[in-house]
Amino acid sequence: IRRAGVIGAGIMGSGIAAAHVKRGVATTLLDADEKALGRGVRSAFEDVAYNKKTKRPDVQRTLQAAPLLHATSELIDLAACDLVIEAVVENAEVKRQIYSQLEPQLRPEAILASNTSTIPITRLAEKLTRPDRFCGLHFFNPVKRMQLVEVIRGRQTSDETVASVVAHAKRIGKHPIVVADGPGFLVNRLLFPYMNEALQLVSEGVSLVEIDRAAKAYGMPMGPIALYDMVGIDTAFYAGRTMWEAYPDRVAASPILPMLMKQGRLGQKSGAGFFSYKNKRGDAQPDPALDPLIAPYCSPSTTKSQTQIISRLMLPMLLEATRVLQEQVVRDPRDVDFGLIYGLGFPAYRGGLLFDTDAVGAAKVVEQLREFESLGSRFRPTPLLLELAGSGTKFYREGRA
Ligand code: 3HC
């Protein structure tokens, strides 16, 4: 892959373009909206200019990178690309419409990949002429820091496409894992029950700061509420919708996200979401203006112990991980732990969620789940967890991992 194209100059698109340019890959960044394109190019250059040694921008790096980044609003400018990564809004119809215009312009051997967060690749490929040259290539936010990419194999994706994209991901400095198709693939499938539970806790009257503090005490690099703001409330809502539709028994649609969107509180990118980012350093600050907005959706304030909050956040993620293993979304437990560590910054010292569960013991986890029985099926032990608990075996047992 000599030339790459990226469609969509938002947070993800500009980050993906920068990741390519940093590794010397000529890249065309496209956005139909010229203002968004301007912002995307600027953000990509800011990213590229950063010198990790001095921790400052370095003009030489920008000068070196400048000839490699080409910005455009015309699809025809992607015709020479060997790989085009689509990173537009999380809407299947919009994506398919772009593909129908783009595919006839590409060479037959070019690969088209989607950075979709949750929409099954096979569904996106429905109207393509060359579905074998199409796959998912899912990056994580912030692209400059998160090393994981998921390469998602749709039903018709060819082995050659998967192999080429895996090699390309390594070339731009990422750690790829190949995952099977399905809503949320691997990492977002595990992330959404955790994020969903954070909103349940908010609606039960637990404070935003307490929720985030508990997640950090467990070892996560940031709390789920701040993560909503970083990912973008709109992105979280659209991605969440795919997950609610797919798994209505365990992911509830919270009215809080659409309310924030209506208020224009889209997270860090708009200066406010759950928190405010309007101070000089752009750090997350509790925002009193939010309180009356969320009050109609929350019970009166309540306190829960940090241990309870951690269990509420982590157990639904663990249960989803057991389902993912049973459905063979990935080949073995290491893929789950690798994905969480490199995609979400899960504390590496715990070895990963499954490794950590092995240390605690599945039987003990089944016991912990009893405390949350009244919360419904999202806290019900899964067949795999019960099997491990019953037999006293581990996820990382011989023969499995
Ligand atoms: N290029 C490379 N490195 C850079 C850089 C650049 N342009 N700019 C800054 N850095 C490096 C600095 O050198 C420094 O590195 P060091 O730690 O080695 O010294 C580091 O970045 C400092 O940056 P920050 O102070 O901003 O970083 P923090 O240490 O505070 O971490 C964080 C910030 C990476 C966001 C961390 O909190 C984290 O990992 N959060 C979790 C993020 C997460 O979960 N992402 C996934 C979201 S889900 C998703 O994206 C999927 C989608 O489909 C919804």
Image (spheres, rainbow, N blue to C red):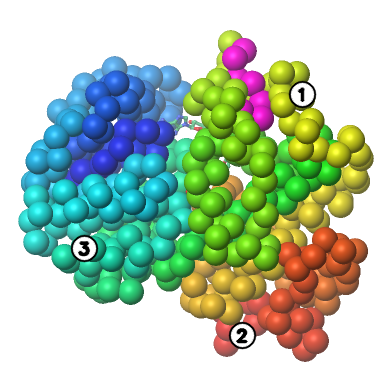
Q: Earlier in the sequence, mark 1 or mark 3?
A: 3
What segment carries the magenta color?
273-279
Q: Which mark is residue 128?
A: 3
Query: Residue at the spot x=82%, y=61% of the render?
Result: 375
Q: Position of residue 229 (x, y in %)?
A: 59, 33
Kindly state the secondary structure of the residue where label 2 is placed: loop
* Magenta stretch: helix, strand or loop mostly: loop
Query: Residue at the spot x=46%, y=46% of the render?
Result: 140
Tell me the crowding category of disc 1: few under 14, some 14 to 19, or many 20 or more residues within 10 angstroms, Cα based: few
The type of residue carrying mark 2 is Glu
Query: Residue at the spot x=55%, y=20% of the render?
Result: 271
Q: Which mark is residue 53?
A: none
Mark 2 vs mark 3: in front: 3
Q: Which mark is residue 398?
A: 2
User: Up-down: is 214 above or below 189?
Assistant: above
The type of residue carrying mark 1 is Pro
Quadrant of residue 321 within the rendered picture: bottom right
| Real-space CA distance between mark 1 and mark 2, rounded to the nearest whole angstrom | 54 Å
Residue under label 1? 292
